[in-house]
Amino acid sequence: MKKKRKERIDRGIKARSDDIFAVTSWREMLYVALPPAIPVVGLLVLPFILPTYWQKVLIATAIFALLAMSWDFLVSAGMVSLGQALFFGVGAYTSGVLDHYAGLPIWLTIPLSTVIGGALCTVFLLPVLRLRGVYFAMVTLVLPLMLERIIEATAIFGGTEGLTGLKPFPNQWIEMYLVGGMVLVVLFGFRRLMTTDYGLVFKALRDNDRAVMSAGLNIYWYKAQALFIAGSLGAFCGAAMTHVYLFVGMPAFALDYSILPLASAVVGGMGTFAGSLLGAFILVPLSEALRGIGGLRIVLYAVALVVFVVALPEGIFHYVKRKYLQFERWVHVDE
Amino acid sequence: MLEVTIVYGFINSVILALIALGFSLTFGISGVANFAYGSMYILSGYAVWILMHKAGIPFVAAALIAVVLTAALGSLLYRFVLLRVRGMEISEVIVTFGTGLAIIELFRYLGFTGFEYTLPVFTDGTVLIGGVYVDHQRLWIVVIGVALAVGLYFFTHYTKLGLAFRGIAQDERTALSLGINSDRIAELSVAMGAGLAAVAAITILPRGTISVNDGYDVLINAMAVCIVGGLGSTVGVVAAAFLIGYAQMITDAFSGPHWKMIVSLVAILVILVIKPSGLFGKQKELEERI
């Protein structure tokens, strides 16, 4: 019996455009430029063409995309978090407190809470940096729940009521372009960062941290830096969302902010950041379109998460990328 | 006041141990993550309620059916979900956590909250213990909890199956070479853990109404007890349950019920920072900590 095997070969245009010849032909230049152009054009144009309601959805989607990229970045550094809500909530409360108690203007609260929030998250997780894998994941799962209960028990920062009447953005265009611009900066910035020597250290942390140690690098110092970067990004999301909702309260530590970024990154494809973006832009509008299901949202995300981890662990982005770069054919194999 | 704290602290500790036994059997002893544990707990509670009130089946039969159903669900979870990601620890955690989340939130969506969702007590009445009135159900909890803890200890130390459970956690390849089918054992372990969750739910839930949020609290409490006690140690589970149980009771008595839950969360954090392998855990110390 003749057996067949699927063979994958790079498309000719891919091989050509890898090279310097790329700049000699419009076709090849387009082939290279098209994929990165999609998110750029999309995020610049979408605010103009969407109706008001969907503009709000766009903001939420971009926020979740940012959280997913922050999750993806932590995973790239070998730290799996089950609690992005920690970063989000800390950022949200920091900006809420800066606004409510210190009365700072919005262009100060957001940058400040990005930095302060990132630093706070790093300090919270500093004691557990030695833990790996499942144990680190458990701690991150537990921390936001604990902070939520502490706020409930001590009634600080408005307790169960939360802080209301915070300052809004001057107008919705600034909201959309601030968040959308941040998505683009983070997407391309992280992708570039992971190819630099600095980013390679993070990847090495994930693959074999002992090798990094024997190279004479302090892995805890690098892990702390990775945490600070991911934490700041998460805190930025929290701060921006606080000023969109004009409210900060215990829902900032809600499970949504932990599970949705995770689901987005897994559905989209881990390790590329573009996958996280894609995942968020699929899942959030989808759940918004299915508004009737209301409380089923988390169920939907959880099921998507499980199905993708089991059935398509590479994620949509890797799948699409493969189709874009390679073609497949069946070849006969000799016995 | 002191007697109340002592007696109810004891009962609270046994409840914690009872909750943690199933989780410990799956995650601690066999090394298979089952973060859908909390959802199995409430699922079996609701299953009994539905069987009794919608299908009109008597309590004892309904309870037995619920235990079997939950165990079957555990085995399905292993066969269709966990098996495919076995060995990738993080994926194991994510898929089981996702499954649990889906089940819990589904119950919330279906509107299973309210005072009518209660399970009947085994026997009615109260007894006086050391000047404190204790109802029969809490005595049942103590009896069943102690019996299960002792049973689990003997099961994992003196039966072939129990030793196989510990074997696949210690070294799966060696276990395979000794003729242990590690996939079958892991499946059994998830199923038995789920069954224990059901037993715990049926014993504990008659104290109050079944609430969806119990799913999360049970998972966190079970995790706290297993981590503090040390993975793979039944003695550790009991010791940690008493430690956390009394700590919770004392916190409750002195600073209000809001702080009760924080005790287990703090316990997880503190023990992971100070001694990641737990109080009585021996294996894996080197792997967890560099």
Image (cartoon, coloured by chain):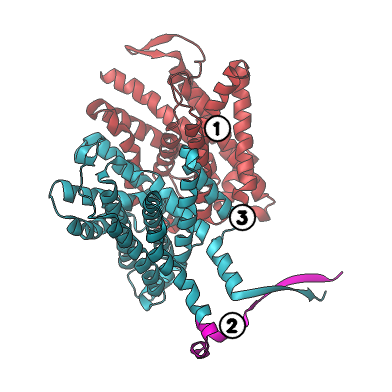
- Quadrant holding the N terminus of chain A: bottom right
Q: Nearer the viewer, mark 2 or mark 3?
A: 2
Which sits earlier in the primary sequence, circle 2 or circle 3? Answer: 2
Determine whether A134 is above or below B135 in the image: below
Residue farthest toward the left in the current orientation of the protein? A102
Disc 1 sits on a residue from what chain? B
Q: Using a 10 Å C-alpha cutoff, classify the residue at mark 2 as few (fewer than 14 neighbours), some (14 to 19) or many (20 or more).
A: some
Q: Is residue A79 visible?
A: no
Q: Is residue A8 magenta?
A: yes
Residue at numbered disc 1: B196
Q: Nearer the viewer, mark 3 or mark 1?
A: 3
Three-letter residue code for mark 1: Leu
Query: Is A48 on the left-hand or right-hand side of A118?
Result: right
Q: Determine contact: label 3, label 1, CB under 8 Å.
A: no
Q: CA distance from mark 3 to mark 1?
A: 29 Å
Horizontally, is A240 left or right of A322 in the view?
left
Q: Drawn colour of chain B?
A: red
Query: In what element is the residue under mark 1?
Result: helix
Q: Secondary structure at mark 3?
A: helix
Residue A311 disc label:
3
Say yes or no: labels 3 and 1 on the same chain. no
Q: Which element is circle 2 on?
A: helix
Q: Nearer the viewer, mark 2 or mark 1?
A: 2
Highlighted range, magenta: A1-29
Disc 2 to disc 1: CB gap under 8 Å: no
Residues at marks 2 and 3, common chain?
Answer: yes
Colour in which chain A is drawn: cyan
Say whether residue A158 is visible.
yes
Residue A13: which numbered mark, if any? 2
In terms of image quadrants, where is residue A163? top left
Crowding at label 1, few (<14), some or many (≥20) Cα neighbours within 10 Å?
A: many
Which residue type does callout 2 highlight? Ile
